[in-house]
Image (cartoon, rainbow, N blue to C red):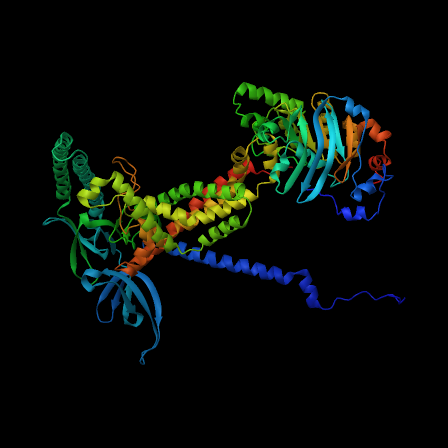
Amino acid sequence: MQASPDASPAAAASGRGPSADPPADRLAAVAAGLEVASEVHEQVLGETPVLEIDRFNLWYAGKQALHAITMPVPHNKVTALVGPSGCGKSTLLRSVNRLNDLVQNIRITGDMRLNGDSIYDPRMDVIELRKRMGMVFQKPNPFPMSIYENVVYALRIDGENSRAVLDEVCELSLRGAALWDEVKDRLHETALGLSGGQQQRLCIARAIAAEPEVLLLDEPCSALDPIATGKIEDLIQELRGRYSVLIVTHNMQQASRTSDYTAFMYLGRLIEYGPTPEIFTKPILRETEAYVTGRFG
Amino acid sequence: MSSEAPRPPRRLRSAHSSLAAHGEPFVWLTGGAIAFAIAMIVGLLAFIAVRGAATFWPAPLVELELSDGRRALGEVSGRERVPAVDGRPACDRTLLKTATFEVTGNHFEWFDDRAVTRTVRPQWATAVERLEGGRFHGVPVRLVRGETTVAEGPERAWEEFRRIHPDVWRRVREALRIDRHDRGALQRQLRAARLAVVQAELRAGRDSPAHAAALAAERTVAERVHERSAALDAETARLRDENAGWGLEFEAAGGQKRVLPLAGIVRAWQPNRLSPAGKAGVYLARWWEFLSDDPREANSAGGVFPAIWGTVAMTLIMALLVAPFGVLAALYLREYASRGPVTSAIRIAINNLAGVPSIVYGAFGLGFFCYVLGAGIDEAFFRPALVADNQPTFGTGGLLWASLTLALLTLPVVIVATEEALAAVPNSMREGSYACGAGKWQTIRRIVLPRALPGIMTGLILAMARGAGEVAPLMLVGVKKLAVDLPIDGTFPFIHPEREFMHLAYLIYDVGFQSPNSQAAKPMVFTITFLLVAIIALLNVAAIWLRSRLRRRYVAQQF
């Protein structure tokens, strides 16, 4: 789990680092443990949100990993989370479908809303919640069963056993994940025999099979070669407009190529969040520009 | 730091340090360890296999003429050197299986080489395996039926014997089958009817209609059994009559004549005349008898089929019992229990259980399964037998209790192996399943268990190997020296898990160390050991095959 480095309050109190107003160097201020406001572009606020993250804080083993994240995720758009390692991108993503519940020693304040439903409401059934989302992980993790069963897994555990329904969902999802033509003749063979890139597309098919309200992609290309990466990126382009996608990536080109909006995070804070072209060409903050052009991070 | 002169390159300190760095001595050390281990194991197995496989080979019969005029006929079964004693020089001596128990009181005899004046292999020397009394060695002289001589001289007598004996032996076996199994079935019918009467009396009271009906039913059964029994008597009498009178007269090495009834001869062969193919035939026939028949003569002859059956059945039932318990326990420990001192303590306790002496499990099995559980079952369901015969049904050792005891014994092995297998399932798979909206149990059943199955199979293989070779606890919970009634047969309810059974490992102990004729039983001990090792290996190979299939299906590697 990402935890902020030793940004002790004592360091801030002792007067080191800038203190007042919008600090000249926000990254230094963040590193010094100061709270800084996020720069959120107007266009983002104009979109209909599918997911609203509202002053979300997360502590892991007593250390704060996410600091008052407030960001809307637009409906049917691709939103990229970028930032250096350990900045809390993955933690934020895993907080959306409450996978962090499985981790011990976690404390959370604030809330998130999925189409208006509070995710962290104590009355929210986490199993039902996760059925409304799909998630794809860094390393392809196909289940030890056939390709077909992998795709319809979410429906199976939901009790759907009608062959016709399952067949249709399987084909639609595999077509949606641009995998149908490659595997249609071996749907009932083990999924473990697929190549890495195919496995990752299978995981995407699995994630979209249950028609998720939001699709969470956690660095989906980090374990793949460039050709497989290209296929996944093309796929994300195709998903744009049909699914609300929240993608974590380390790859700036990937973020600029595939996403509509980009959020830059640093040490558990949201620094700047806006339309991708603006973030990459004329960001409000120098720090963002420094990061996306590779001069820092 | 400041010196300007270039430093000379560092030299290796010694050849010794270079050797250590390259690590060659350690290759030899580790390789030597594995070579030693393999040599020990292969040596043991080869020894057992050679001795065990040789038991049934028809060895030549040798006749020794001694300087005092005596003669002895038998198989050479050992040679050793006698050291010089009291001025007599050292010499070799031969152990001969003379099979002259009736005459000399010994099955075996040592002969000093210096006392032997002549060694021959008589052409017509015959080894006879008898139904009772062990082996007999001699030369056939004539075949008789009652007072009349049917064939005279070794060649004709042997020919006639070979022609007649199969029919005689078939009738003997038929009579034996009737005595052992058919009569037993009748006795069981009679007992069931009698117990039904007791049951009716216990339930409805004496002189109640139910009691009267049961009594009437018992009378019918008794009549039917009586009739059937008389028919069996007539049948066996007919079979024995047909066999009566047939005899083969032998001349033993000492010159004494002796008539062996044909009905008492299991098999006879003339090893000195047999071709290799003929020897192989005798060899295979004896193996077949060993594998398929009931034991004879205090288990030192005949077959071990009931013991094979008991060993395999007990091992499989044990595996069936231990698998669900072990897997469920491991699932709780690994998937549900929160990490903490209590979980660690339980884990350590389970590991320690693996070190408890097996006899302790046997005592527990006897005390709890037989005397508490079994007695409870008897009290609830088998009261008539308890009241009328004072005979426990489940309240004593039996196949079920033995399997349960061994399941308990092997439980730690399965739990530990399953826990390892569960720990080896990548967390990414669990997370993927949760992210799809699966619950904990759905994830375990659909993702974790299939993926861990090969590892669980490894635990079961270890458990089976351990359980199949165990003797001490079995002696307390149901293994018997002789139990030819298998726990599965044609009488209702067909499966009798309460019956006592035989077990190969116990048979090794019994034949090897409790036999009155241990010298003769020695080859049998090797053969039984060989068979037990082979059966365990076979069970393991089957399980390993299953595991590799599962592994291909669930754990195939990517790329």
Of B232 and B425, the residue lying toward us: B425
- Decide if residue B107 is on the left or right side of residue B197: right
Q: Residue at x 58, y 29 (%)?
A: A125
Give the residue furthest to the bottom. B87
Q: Position of residue B521 (x, y in %)?
A: 30, 57
Residue at image point 60% right, 24% down? A185
Assign the N terminus of chain B to one quadrant of the image: bottom right
Q: Quadrant of the C terminus of chain B?
A: top right
Instruction: Estimate the x, y position of residue A150 in percent, counting from the top left.
Output: 58, 29
Quadrant location of residue B61? bottom left
Expressed as whole percent of the image width and height from the top left, the position of residue A4 reads 74, 43
Relative vertical location of residue B472 with respect to residue A252 in this rendering, above or below: below
Looking at the picture, tell me which residue is in the foreground, B418 or B30.
B418
Q: Find residue B489 and report its image quarter.
A: top left
**In this view, B162 is above or below B212:** below
| Nearer-the-camera pick, A220 or A102 | A102
Q: Is residue B323 visible?
A: yes
Q: Position of residue B261 (x, y in %)?
A: 16, 50
Describe residue B504's horizontal placement relative to residue B556 as left or right: left
Give the quarter of the image for residue B100. bottom left
* Drawn side of residue B312 relative to residue B415, left or right: left
Residue B289 seen anywhere in this rendered image of the structure: no
Q: Residue furthest right?
A: B4
Q: Identify the residue at the far left of this view.
A: B147
Give the number of callouts.
0
